[in-house]
Image (spheres, rainbow, N blue to C red):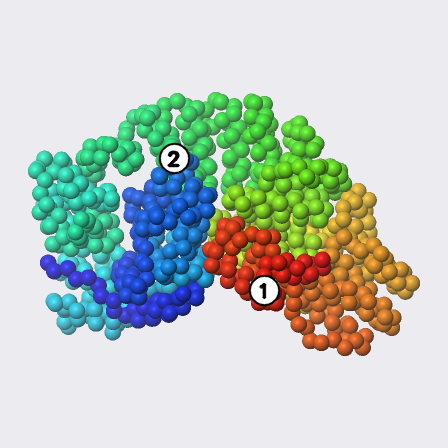
């Protein structure tokens, strides 16, 4: 039969979009996710994209997903970057090492996909500096997970580089990519479907044509393939179109002679199979001499396409149909044949051997265990789960089997397969008598968000018991890690009024040095009000000139953050973030960024803090961590609230159930409530603000949070006074006074002094206002709010000179911080004093976008564009564009001037 390839018909808008993207080169690039159901013509469309790009002298780099190689980490990326291998030597060392290990050039532990993605971005940017680049990744859903992650990380960062990335995939996947522009293919219109049919030499007419158009429903592949099966298909049978197409291919497959069927099936089982391998496997199985005519027969009926040096299936549905139509006996025979043919390549045959293994096989179990390790390091937990489960099945030793099942359960939890994880943990508890293994199983069970988990219902008992067992069996390091993890859970998720109190016995049992940074953090989590002063004093006594690593700096900065000491917390967290950027430690970086973002918010560095939160959103997407992404989005909502924009939980959660679940955590819930309250106050709705903010101060409310209650105290006090609820403001002030007797942190003292100033009048107000000049509040924004409050009331009392002084002080801080709504309020009050003010002229650092600010800060510190790009996970061209924008907005022309401009904006 003559095989017709679907033509590019009915895709005018898609082709126009691609042409438009090309027209924007070289000023900016783009990334496009092309989605569509099977048969709609994704591959044909990207082929046309490639043809048009080549006609414009663009360099075209391609890769595609295959079923077999989907289990081989970085296989797809290797294929894509092969033409750029001569450029590897120019990469920053961590990125070069990552790619060389990933591609097997040098030995080493598998790199994180994040670092491989940054290396990909750098290579693409370097290549595009010579001529624009088109990157095509067809069948993204079949690419190995490590390559998928790396490609998506690079694609999301394409901004000012002349690179277009086109990824094609089927819609509706569990791990659907986010952060990319989507282009969804629709079925062909009636007119276009008819036009495609007219291209067939045997195009149908009349009733047959109408029936075919109805059955195909605008699917180009169906319009081409269904006519051959129309005589045997029941048009009234309610069968999905994909199934009809598969039936058509099954019919052709079953009509082949057995050797030809075996050759086609061999290719379906091994999609890296060459024509020679397929023929050889079929010959071994059928007992015939090899014959190339077998593949010719398959090509003649439209199952495969033969090209010089290679062959492949015409469409993924053909492979699916072949596998469906084959028998288990035939597959087993072909597995044996393929194993024999590739006996010298155990990596290629590992899954076939695992499929055939029936009894204990220690060597194969070890191989699968090693493969799982590669998968976990390469962001392929699903593949690791499959390998570990099979490895455990082939392991005779009970304890070793249990350890592999524990690892499998952890991998299952990573992909949200909690029922599988629960089943594996139950097996461990049933098989092993080893106390350490059983304790680990109990601990992992408590981390699962399932009904059987006591921790999920707020009961820390079983988790603490597991930690106690870890210590008793000589695993203190594992116990310490577990306590730190449990402390994070308590802080972020517990609804108890004192969330860390339940952990105090476990923390004490660790017997850590009181000055150990980990102990200081645990102390802050368990009892910040009671131990805050001691924590601050111990950290202040440390030698600040001593060299510390990133993790230590994070522990100390986070401990100070929780203890209410902001200035030194900022220093430690900035040190931690700087080191983590330099070393590329992506796993800890987002946690340090979140801590730094919050500390900046409390400290009044709004633009900088928002930049860290936005970066965290991007990293959360890169790491496929919806919880982290939701937390960062909630943090951004808090910054937006300062300008009166309330949060939108639906937008924050997106389409992710895990993100929606994260919104129920105590810390995120409190963040969103604080944001709603702040936004309502700024918008002039004090009653609504009170409704929200009082939840943070009520111990019986699930959102109760001591720290948030202190941070939002100025908002609550103002809202209460504006709403005529002075007794509520007084009551809240008394509560802060009680707290301050045992928690002498700068954060608490600032809140208390603000409350006192807000409640006084007359001579007491004059005294409190004067004190602001001699003894400023340690929290800059709270200090500015205090000056605004004092200035407003002094104006109303007709103390014009004093009012202007305090209002100008407040305005300077609000302008520097980028708190526009508060600055506007200050200007209105100053005008009410009779002062003539020019219209607001944005200046200083708050005119920069968050990304521009981060780039400018690093450039002012003396870093080159390439080093900045490496640390901010961008291309150097994107860094250059941001830096140029910063120069223009700040009115400077060099890095030296930039440093002065930023220092001036900081009040330096």
* Labels 2, 1: front one: 1
Q: Position of residue 523 (x, y in %)?
A: 69, 37
User: Measured along the vertical axis of the image, is residue 366 above or below residue 613?
Assistant: above
User: Residue at image x 91%, y 63%?
Assistant: 763
Q: Name the residue under label 1.
A: 893
- Horizontal side, residue 771 vs residue 462: left or right: right
Residue at which label 2 appears? 107
Q: Where is residue 116 in the image (x, y as percent from the top left)?
A: 42, 46
N-term mark: 2 or 1? 2
User: Mark 2, residues whose alpha carbon is within 10 Å: few (<14), some, or many (≥20)?
Assistant: few
Answer yes or no: is residue 352 visible.
Answer: yes
For the N terminus, the image quarter is: bottom left
Report helix, strand or loop for mark 2.
loop
Q: Give the image quarter of residue 281.
A: top left
For the C terminus, give its image quadrant: bottom right
Q: Does the residue at mark 2 contact the one at mark 1 (Cβ under 8 Å)?
A: no
What's the CA distance linking mark 2 and mark 1? 46 Å
């Amino acid at each position: 039969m003559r095989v017709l390839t679907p033509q590019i018909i009915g895709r005018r808008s898609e082709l126009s979009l691609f042409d438009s993207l090309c027209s924007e080169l070289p000023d900016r690039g783009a990334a496009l996710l092309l989605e569509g159901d099977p048969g709609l013509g994704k591959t044909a469309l990207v082929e046309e994209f490639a043809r048009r790009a080549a006609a414009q002298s663009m360099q075209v780099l391609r890769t595609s997903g295959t079923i077999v190689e989907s289990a081989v980490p970085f296989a797809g990326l290797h294929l894509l970057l092969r033409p750029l291998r001569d450029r590897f030597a120019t990469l920053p060392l961590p990125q070069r090492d990552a790619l060389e290990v990933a591609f097997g050039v040098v030995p080493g532990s598998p790199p994180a996909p994040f670092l491989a993605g940054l290396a990909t971005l750098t290579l693409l940017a370097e290549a595009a500096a010579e001529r624009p680049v088109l990157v095509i990744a067809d069948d993204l859903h079949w690419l190995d997970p490590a390559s998928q992650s790396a490609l998506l990380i690079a694609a999301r960062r394409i901004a000012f580089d002349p690179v277009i990335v086109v990824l094609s995939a089927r819609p509706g996947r569990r791990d659907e990519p986010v952060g990319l522009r989507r282009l969804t293919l629709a079925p062909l219109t009636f007119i276009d479907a008819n036009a495609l049919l007219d291209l067939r030499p045997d195009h149908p007419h009349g009733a047959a044509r109408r029936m075919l158009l109805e059955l195909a429903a605008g699917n180009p592949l169906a319009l081409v393939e269904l006519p051959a099966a129309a005589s045997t298909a029941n048009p009234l049978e309610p069968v999905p179109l994909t199934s009809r197409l598969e039936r058509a291919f099954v019919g052709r497959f079953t009509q082949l002679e057995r050797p030809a069927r075996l050759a086609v099936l061999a290719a379906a089982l091994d999609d890296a199979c060459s024509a020679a391998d397929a023929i050889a496997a079929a010959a071994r199985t059928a007992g015939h001499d090899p014959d190339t005519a077998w593949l010719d027969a398959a090509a003649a009926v439209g199952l495969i396409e033969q090209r010089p040096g290679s062959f492949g299936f015409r469409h993924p549905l053909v492979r699916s149909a072949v596998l469906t139509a084959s028998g288990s006996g035939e597959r087993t025979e072909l597995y044996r044949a393929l194993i024999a043919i590739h006996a010298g390549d155990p990596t290629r045959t590992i899954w076939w051997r695992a499929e055939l293994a029936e009894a204990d096989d220690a060597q194969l179990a070890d191989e699968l265990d090693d493969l799982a390790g590669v998968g976990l390091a390469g962001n392929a937990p699903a593949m690791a789960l499959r390998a570990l489960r099979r490895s455990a099945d082939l392991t005779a030793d009970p304890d070793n089997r249990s350890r592999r099942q524990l690892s499998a359960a952890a991998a299952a939890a990573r992909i949200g397969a909690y029922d599988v994880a629960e089943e594996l943990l139950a097996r461990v508890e049933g098989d092993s008598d080893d106390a350490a293994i059983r304790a680990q199983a109990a601990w992992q069970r408590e981390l699962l968000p399932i009904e059987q988990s006591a921790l999920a219902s707020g009961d820390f008992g079983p988790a603490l018991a597991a930690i106690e067992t870890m210590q008793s069996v000589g695993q203190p390091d594992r116990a310490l890690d577990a306590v730190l993890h449990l402390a994070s859970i308590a802080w972020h998720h517990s609804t108890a009024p004192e969330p860390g109190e339940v952990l105090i016995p476990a923390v004490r049992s660790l017997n850590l040095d009181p000055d150990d940074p980990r102990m200081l953090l645990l102390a802050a989590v368990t009892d910040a009000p009671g131990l805050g002063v001691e924590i601050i004093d111990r950290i202040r006594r440390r030698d600040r000139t001593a060299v510390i690593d990133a993790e230590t700096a994070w522990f100390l900065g986070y401990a100070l953050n929780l203890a209410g000491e902001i200035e030194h917390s900022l220093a430690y967290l900035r040190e931690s973030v700087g080191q983590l950027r330099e070393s590329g430690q992506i796993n800890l970086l987002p946690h340090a960024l979140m801590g730094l973002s919050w500390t900046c918010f409390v400290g009044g560095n709004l633009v900088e803090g928002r930049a860290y939160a936005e970066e965290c959103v991007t990293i959360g997407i890169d790491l496929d961590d919806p919880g982290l992404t939701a937390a960062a989005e909630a943090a951004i909502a808090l910054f937006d609230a300062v300008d009166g924009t309330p949060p939108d939980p639906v937008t924050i959660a997106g389409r992710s159930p895990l993100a929606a679940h994260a919104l129920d955590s105590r810390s995120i819930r409190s963040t969103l409530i604080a944001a709603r309250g702040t936004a309502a106050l700024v918008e002039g709705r004090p009653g609504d603000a009170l409704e929200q903010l009082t939840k943070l101060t009520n111990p019986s409310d699930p959102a109760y949070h001591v720290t948030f209650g202190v941070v939002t105290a100025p908002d609550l006090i103002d809202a209460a006074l504006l709403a005529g609820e002075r007794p509520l403001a007084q009551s809240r002030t008394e509560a802060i006074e009680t707290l301050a007797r045992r928690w002498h942190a700068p954060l608490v003292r600032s809140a208390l002094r603000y409350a006192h100033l807000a409640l006084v009048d007359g001579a007491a107000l004059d005294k409190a206002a004067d004190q602001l000049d001699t003894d400023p509040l340690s929290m800059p924004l709270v200090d500015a709010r205090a000056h605004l409050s004092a200035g407003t009331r002094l104006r109303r009392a007709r103390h014009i000179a004093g009012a202007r002084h305090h209002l100008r002080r407040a305005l300077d801080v609000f302008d520097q911080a980028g708190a526009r709504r508060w600055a506007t309020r200050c200007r209105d009050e100053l005008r009410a004093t009779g002062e003539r003010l020019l219209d607001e002229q944005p200046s200083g650092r708050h005119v920069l976008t968050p990304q521009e600010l981060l780039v400018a800060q690093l450039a002012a510190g003396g870093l080159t564009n390439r080093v900045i790009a490496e640390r901010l996970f961008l291309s150097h061209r994107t860094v250059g564009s941001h830096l140029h924008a910063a120069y223009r907005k700040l009115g400077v022309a060099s890095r030296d001037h930039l440093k002065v401009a930023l220092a001036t904006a900081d009040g330096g």
